[in-house]
Structures are given as C-alpha cells and as structure tokens.
Image: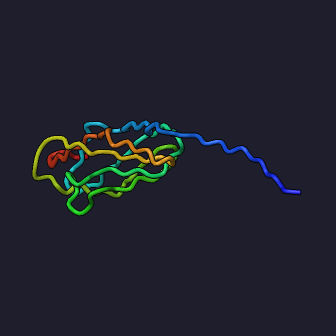
Amino acid sequence: MIGYNSSVLTITVDSTVPSVISKYHNVYVKNGNRLTLNALYRYTSGMKNATVNVSSINSTINDAILTLSGGYWINTTIIADRGDTAGFKNLTITAYDNASNINNSVNMTAGIDNTAHR
C-alpha cells in the first residue's frame, strides 16, 4: 500500500503599502535641542520597522530609527544641529511592513529656529 498525504496550502499576497501619517508638521526646534519624531502607521501586514531621514537637520545621523511606543512610532534622541539655513526641511519617513512593502512617500516638516525659546 502506498501512503498518500493531502494538504491544502493557502497563500495570501499582500502588496498594499503601509499607510503612514506624520503626527507633526511645520515643527520648529531650537538649534542644539532635541526634535521629537512621531508617526502613526495603519498596518497592512503588521509593521516591521520605520525610519526618518534626518540628515537635513542633523550632521551625524542619516536615518533615525523609530520605535513603537503607545501606538505611535517615535524617536526623541535626534539633536537638531544644522541651523545654518533657514526654512523648513522635509524629513522623509520610510516604513516597511512584514510583507516587505515599503512606503517612503510621506514627509514631516521641521525647521531650526535659533531665535525661538522652544
């Protein structure tokens, strides 16, 4: 007698990019102070990781890693130290979900204000 094993394999394809919402826009920070990065993600296949490109406001870090805390992805360790140019900078948020979908089309805006008492 030959044994026969039958199983059903179901594959789900997720090609939906994660929905990303920046919690801060047009934020000013004083040169030398910390900037809070805060984003909300609507999960597709669960969030794998998230970063924000902060190279336009920080001279030593290109991409700041966000961590999940209280339902938001945040980072409070970035020091704004590029106060030599005025105006807001676009900081690109990049998010990956567990299906390896990527969203890098959302920005938060931050500006360094050397006269502000913030």
Q: Quadrant of the N terminus?
A: bottom right
Front residue (pair 1, 111): 1
Q: How is the image coloured?
A: rainbow
- Residue 103 is situated, as x and y percent measured from the top left of the image, at 38, 42
Residue in front for this viewpoint, 31 or 54: 54
Give the residue at the far right of this rendering: 1
Give the residue displayed 19% in from the left and 57% down from the top.
81
99 and 41: which one is in front? Answer: 99
Q: Residue furthest front?
A: 1
Residue 19 vertical placement versus 54 (above, below): above
Percent of width and height locating residue 7 = 74, 47
Residue 7's place in the image compared with 2, above or below, is above
Decide if residue 106 is on the left or right side of residue 46: left
Q: Furthest-bottom residue in view? A: 60
Q: Is residue 96 above or below residue 106?
A: below
Q: Which sits in the foreground, 18 or 25? A: 18
Q: Residue at x 34, y 56 (%)?
A: 64
How many discs appear? 0
Query: Percent position (x, y) of residue 84?
Result: 10, 52
- Return the x and y of residue 14 as percentages of the image width and height: 51, 39
Residue at 33% across / 50% down in the picture? 52
Position of 33 with respect to 39 (left or right) is: left
